Image (cartoon, grey):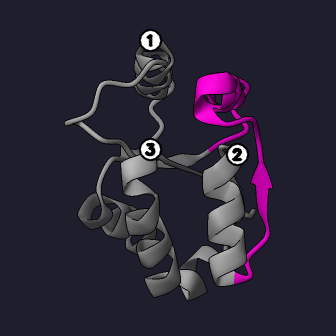
């Protein structure tokens, strides 16, 4: 069964996500990928991988992915968030982190952890 992996990155972390995705393109090609609006588009354009896009995070994309976690439709999340920048949709971010813990979904918040998750899956 192909696992579903969600990709999310705050604005200041999008280039870091693209670099990580390019470095791990071969492994990522084994997943059914999805992500929030701009992140999914940028990763897809940079890697050539098919990444299903949801809304952007501030417009509800984090919540859409959280709903998919609750429906057991997402197996892992890579979420490069910016801990040094206030986010206008911070409650949505916290809700996504909370639902991931409730449903025991691995969630990586930096490249090192993301790499560990996909290489040990």
Distance from disc 1 to disc 2, alpha carbons, whole Å, reads 18 Å
Rendered image quadrant of residue 113: bottom left
- Confirm or deny contact between disc 2 and disc 3 (CB under 8 A): no
Could you tell me which secondary element the residue under label 1 belongs to? helix
Quarter that holds the N terminus = bottom right
Please name the residue that numbered disc 2 is placed on.
37
Residue span colored magenta: 48-74
Q: Quadrant of residue 117?
A: bottom left
Residue 64 placement, left or right of 18: right
Q: Residue at x 42, y 44 (%)?
A: 106
Residue 13, picture quadrant: bottom left
Please name whichever residue, 50 or 15, is drawn nearer the observer in this view of the structure.
Answer: 15
Q: Residue at x 80, y 54 (%)?
A: 52
Label disc, if present, on residue 10 of the rendered structure: 3
Q: Is residue 52 magenta?
A: yes
- Up the image or down, 50 lies above or below 113; here it is below
Q: Considering only vertical position in the picture, is 104 above or below 60?
A: below
Q: Which residue is mark 1?
A: 91
* Callout 3: SS: loop
The magenta stretch spans residue 63: yes
């Amino acid at each position: 069964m192909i696992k579903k992996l969600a990709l999310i990155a705050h604005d200041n972390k999008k280039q870091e996500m693209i670099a990580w995705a390019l470095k791990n393109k071969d492994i990522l090609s084994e997943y059914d990928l999805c992500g929030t609006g701009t992140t999914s588009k940028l990763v897809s354009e940079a890697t050539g991988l098919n990444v299903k896009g949801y809304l952007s995070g501030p417009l509800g994309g984090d919540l859409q992915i959280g709903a998919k976690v609750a429906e057991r439709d997402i197996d892992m999340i890579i979420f490069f968030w910016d801990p040094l920048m206030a986010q206008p949709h911070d409650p949505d971010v916290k809700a996504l982190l909370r639902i991931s813990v409730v449903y025991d979904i691995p969630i990586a918040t930096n490249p090192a952890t993301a790499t560990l998750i996909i290489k040990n899956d």
